[in-house]
Image: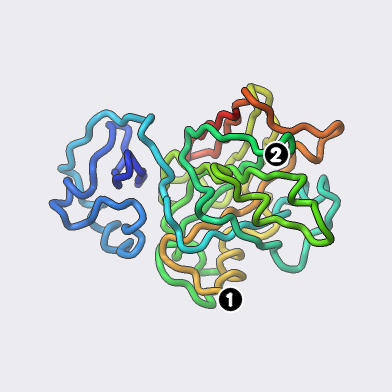
C-alpha cells in the first residue's frame, strides 16, 4: 500500500492513480494525512479490501509531506560504516541521536532557500511509527512501522560545528530542511525491507550510492533502542541515517548552491527532488 498527502488530504496511491480516502471510505476516515496513524490497524484493514475504490490521475504537483505533523522526529547520525569513516568517527556503542524540528518538514518537490553557503545533502530512509512503542524488542521492530519514505536531512554545516558542542538539531531544522516523500510505502510492498538501494545526485552528478543493509543499526534495532528511552507515538518519524558521499567530507568540500537540484532515490519507494535558491 502507498498513501500520500495530496493537497493536504490523505490519498491511496496505485499505478492507476490516487483516491481521496475520506471520500472513498464514506467518511469513516478523515481527510487529514496525519490522523490516519492513530487508527493505523483499522485503516490498513479497510485499505486492503478497498477493491471498488475509484482512482483518478495523480497530480504530483500537489504532493506534500506524507507525514506532515509528527509529534516527534528522531534522527540518527553516523549509521553507515563508510559515512562514519569519512566523518572521522568510529561506530558508537549507541546510535547518535538528535532531532529535526517538525517545522522543517516539507514535501517531495520543494524549493528551499539556502541560509548560507554551507548547506549539505544527506539522503535517508525515513520510517513512520504505526502504534505506541515502549521498550520494544528488536524482533518486533518492524511490527511498529506503518511504512517508509524518502527523506533529505539537509544540514547547515557551519552552525553544526559552532561552539564546543555540536548543534545538530538547529543546524538541520531551517525552513524546508526536511524534504520527505513522495509517499509512504508499507513494508510488504518493498523488494527487501532490510536491503534497499539508496542514493542521491546533485545537478546530475551521483553523490551517494549504497544500500540500507549497510546500516550499523538496522531499523528494528533503532526501534528497540529509541523505544527503550522514549515512548514512540503513532505518526512519529525516524530519519535512519545517511551513507557516505556527503559534501563536507569531500576534498575539496562541496556544498549546495543556488540553482542546484538534489534528487534522492530509494529502491521500492521512488525519488524526491529539491531545488535550491
Question: Percent x, y for residue 24?
Answer: 17, 46
Find numbered disc 1 in the image and state the secondary structure of the residue it sits on. Answer: loop
Q: Residue 200 lies in what quarter of the image?
A: top right
Instruction: Say few, some or many: other residues with alpha carbon within 10 Å of mark 2 (under 14 / 14 to 19 / 20 or more).
Output: many
What residue is pinned by disc 1?
A: 228
Q: Secondary structure at mark 2?
A: strand
- For disc 1, the neighbor class at 10 Å (few under 14, some 14 to 19, many from 20) is some
Q: Nearer the viewer, residue 210 or 154?
A: 154
* Residue at 27%, 31% in the rendered image: 16
On screen, residue 38 versus residue 221, left or right, reads left
Q: How is the image coloured?
A: rainbow
| Residue 74 horizontal/vertical position (percent) | 58, 60
- The answer to whether the residues at label 2 and label 1 have Cβ atoms under 8 Å apart is no
Q: CA distance from mark 2 to mark 1?
A: 31 Å
Judge whether 210 appears above or below 28 on screen. Answer: above
Q: Residue furthest left?
A: 26
Q: Quadrant of the C terminus?
A: top right
Q: Specify which label sits upstream in the sequence, 2 or 1.
A: 2
Residue toward you, 273 or 276: 276
> Is 185 positioned to the left or the right of 176 in the image?
left
Q: Which residue is mark 2?
A: 120
In percent of width and height, residue 148 lies at 48, 50
**Residue 232 versus residue 254 in the image, above or below:** below
Residue at screen point 55% across, 44% down: 175
Amino acid at each position: 500500500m502507498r498513501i500520500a498527502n495530496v493537497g493536504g488530504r490523505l490519498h491511496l496511491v496505485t499505478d492507476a492513480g490516487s483516491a481521496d480516502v475520506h471520500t472513498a471510505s464514506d467518511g469513516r476516515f478523515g481527510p487529514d494525512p496525519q490522523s490516519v496513524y492513530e487508527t493505523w490497524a483499522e485503516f490498513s484493514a479497510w485499505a486492503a479490501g478497498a477493491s471498488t475504490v475509484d482512482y483518478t490521475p495523480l497530480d504530483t504537483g500537489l504532493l506534500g509531506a506524507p507525514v506532515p505533523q509528527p509529534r516527534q522526529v528522531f534522527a540518527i547520525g553516523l549509521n553507515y560504516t563508510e559515512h562514519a569513516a569519512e566523518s572521522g568517527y568510529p561506530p558508537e556503542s549507541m546510535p547518535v541521536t538528535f532531532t529535526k524540528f517538525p517545522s522543517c518538514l516539507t514535501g517531495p518537490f520543494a524549493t528551499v532557500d539556502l541560509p548560507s553557503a554551507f548547506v549539505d545533502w544527506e539522503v535517508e530512509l525515513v520510517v513512520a511509527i504505526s502504534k505506541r512503542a515502549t521498550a520494544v524488542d528488536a524482533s518486533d521492530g518492524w511490527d511498529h512501522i506503518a511504512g517508509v519514505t524518502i527523506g533529505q536531512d539537509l544540514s547547515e554545516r557551519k552552525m553544526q560545528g559552532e561552539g564546543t558542542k555540536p548543534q545538530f538539531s538547529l543546524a538541520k531544522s531551517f525552513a524546508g530542511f526536511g524534504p520527505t516523500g513522495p509517499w509512504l510505502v508499507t513494508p510488504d510492498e518493498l523488494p527487501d525491507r532490510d536491503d534497499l538501494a539508496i542514493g542521491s545526485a546533485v545537478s546530475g552528478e551521483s553523490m551517494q550510492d549504497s544500500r540500507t543493509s549497510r546500516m550499523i543499526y538496522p531499523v528494528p534495532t533503532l526501534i528497540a533502542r529509541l523505544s527503550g528511552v522514549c515512548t514512540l507515538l503513532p505518526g512519529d518519524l525516524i530519519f535512519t541515517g545517511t551513507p557516505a558521499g556527503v559534501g563536507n567530507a569531500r576534498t575539496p568540500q562541496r556544498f549546495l548552491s543556488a540553482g542546484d537540484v538534489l534528487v534522492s532515490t530509494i529502491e521500492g519507494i521512488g525519488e524526491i527532488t529539491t531545488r535550491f535558491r
